[in-house]
Image (tube, rainbow, N blue to C red):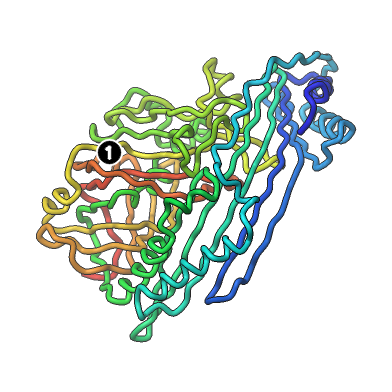
């Protein structure tokens, strides 16, 4: 993408302002998408974006500039702009000698999506739509979206690091509207991974569509959820987003450093049930949030954040880790070359336990069985959260019975962690996009079927 001698000259130029640290991040990103809405292909697009971001750090000040001009002249101009932004005095010059580059991690993709004819992608959409409509006569509308992306990048810094990666991701999502008795209900399901088009050899596309359709149709028969404190059983995968939002963000070292985390100063303390071991793992093979190196060039790792209920560590990007005299945990990520890296999660999940998921339900006389969570809000400083349930059922006498609608889960992250009293031996993940400070990055979350002994359900029933 950029020859290494050019990178070295750009880094040297970036340090002329007296910066302590400089970094070049160059990226070449391609993407394509297709959307089918009620039998019509509404969108069939592709795009490419290339450019570089240059970061210069001087003391506590960071200067940043980005450019789509990857010529040496364009990069030197961006380096001068970033250096000027970071300049607080001094004009020292530091020559940069790049070390031998780490072997570039090639993509694991077996079938590059860019080599797949558009007709095959459109065929996926039609297969999903047909399956969704065949699932239930109440289905009124179906929207299917396919997307893929290939992202190649090079990162080098004034410490001599040079590294790069080729990342390929594909994803399919289905949204269904079902109607009956004067009401409309929606269902949604998605499947994706850091893999090529071969994912559709092992993902049941029709099955994904049927799940979305069944969710929408079941809600037509749903009754109002109860309100108040009840036991809540989270089906495998369902609670992953809760742990991502209500616990994971509070374990990001930038929020900890800003005193915006309820977990600040609690390393070594028991913050969760002994049943809980929480992991963030960027090296999880083929998962949606996986990679070989992060966007600062440091290897992805399996980081145990909470072990047997005890807080063991936070997630770190390179600069915050260096300031603390420790290594990066491989959590420095950015949306693209136009953005600065920050501490971000990857694939965040709670490890499975030993109990039979069906037995957990049988041992729950009354409560709520949550199969899918929707959007929510979290205050990382306090851990308080509110999440909507998009698929949930009542548990009566140890049996899952009526579907529920219009309900929220309301609670506090640390309190929920401490209230988990059963952990199943199954496991599932969910792929999504994490938004933070205006940047979105692919992540996944997951957990086994588990029970929270008491949580506030904000329903409209009695």
Q: Position of residue 164 (x, y in %)?
A: 65, 29
Foreground pick, 182 / 288: 288
Q: Position of residue 357 (x, y in %)?
A: 20, 48
Res 87 seen here: no
Q: Position of residue 205 (x, y in %)?
A: 44, 60
Query: Is 101 left, or right, of 301 in this rendering?
Result: right
Query: Is 295 left, or right, of 328 in this rendering?
Result: right
Q: Which secondary structure lies at badge 1?
A: loop
Residue farthest to the bottom, as pictured? 182
The answer to which quarter of the image holds residue 392 is bottom left
Res 183 seen here: yes
* Residue at 16% across, 48% down: 360
Q: Compared with residue 154, is residue 68 higher up or lower down, i.e. above or below?
A: below
Q: Position of residue 415 (x, y in %)?
A: 29, 42
Query: Is 457 left, or right, of 296 in this rendering?
Result: left
* Residue at 25% across, 68% down: 403
Query: Is 293 left, or right, of 2 in this rendering?
Result: left
Q: Compared with residue 165, is residue 36 higher up or lower down, i.e. above or below?
A: below
The residue beneath circle 1 is: 352
* Residue at 69% across, 45% down: 29
The answer to which quarter of the image holds residue 209 is bottom left
């Amino acid at each position: 993408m950029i020859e290494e001698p050019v990178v070295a000259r750009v880094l040297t130029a970036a340090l002329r302002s007296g910066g302590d640290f400089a970094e070049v991040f160059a990226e070449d990103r391609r993407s394509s998408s297709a959307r089918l809405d009620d039998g019509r292909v509404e969108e069939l697009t592709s795009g490419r974006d290339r450019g570089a971001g240059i970061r210069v750090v001087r003391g506590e000040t960071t200067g940043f500039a980005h450019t789509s001009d990857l010529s040496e002249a364009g990069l030197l101009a961006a380096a001068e702009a970033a250096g000027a932004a970071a300049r607080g005095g001094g004009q020292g010059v530091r020559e940069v000698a790049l070390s031998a580059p780490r072997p570039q991690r090639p993509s694991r993709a077996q079938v590059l999506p860019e080599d797949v004819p558009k007709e095959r992608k459109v065929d996926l959409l039609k297969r999903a739509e047909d399956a969704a409509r065949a699932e239930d006569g109440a289905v009124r509308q179906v929207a299917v979206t396919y997307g893929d992306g290939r992202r190649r990048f090079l990162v080098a810094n004034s410490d001599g690091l040079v590294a790069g990666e080729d990342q390929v991701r594909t994803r399919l999502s289905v949204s269904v509207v079902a109607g009956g008795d004067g009401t409309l209900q929606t269902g949604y399901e998605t499947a994706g991974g850091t893999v090529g088009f071969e994912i559709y050899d092992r993902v049941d596309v029709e099955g994904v569509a049927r799940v979305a359709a069944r969710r929408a149709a079941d809600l037509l028969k749903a009754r109002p959820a109860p309100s108040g404190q009840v036991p809540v059983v989270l089906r495998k995968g369902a609670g992953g987003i809760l742990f991502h939002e209500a616990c994971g963000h509070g374990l990001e070292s930038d929020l900890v450093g800003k005193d915006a985390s309820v977990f600040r100063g609690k390393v070594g303390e028991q913050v969760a049930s002994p049943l809980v071991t929480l992991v963030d793992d960027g090296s999880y093979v083929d998962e949606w949030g996986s990679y070989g190196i992060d966007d600062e060039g440091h290897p992805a790792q399996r980081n145990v954040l909470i072990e047997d209920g005890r807080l063991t560590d936070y997630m770190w990007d390179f600069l915050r880790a260096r300031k603390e005299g420790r290594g990066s945990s491989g959590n420095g990520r950015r949306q693209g070359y136009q953005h600065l890296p920050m501490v971000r999660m990857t694939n965040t999940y709670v490890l499975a336990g030993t109990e039979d998921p069906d037995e957990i339900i049988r041992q729950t006389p009354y409560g709520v069985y949550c199969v899918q969570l929707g959007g929510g809000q979290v205050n990382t400083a306090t851990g308080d959260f509110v999440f909507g349930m998009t698929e949930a059922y009542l548990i009566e006498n140890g049996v899952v019975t009526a579907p529920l609608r219009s309900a929220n889960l309301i609670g506090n992250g640390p309190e929920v962690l401490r209230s988990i009293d059963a952990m199943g031996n199954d496991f599932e993940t969910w792929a999504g996009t994490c938004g933070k400070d205006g940047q979105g990055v692919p992540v996944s979350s997951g957990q086994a079927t588990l029970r929270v002994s008491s949580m506030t359900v904000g329903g409209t029933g009695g």
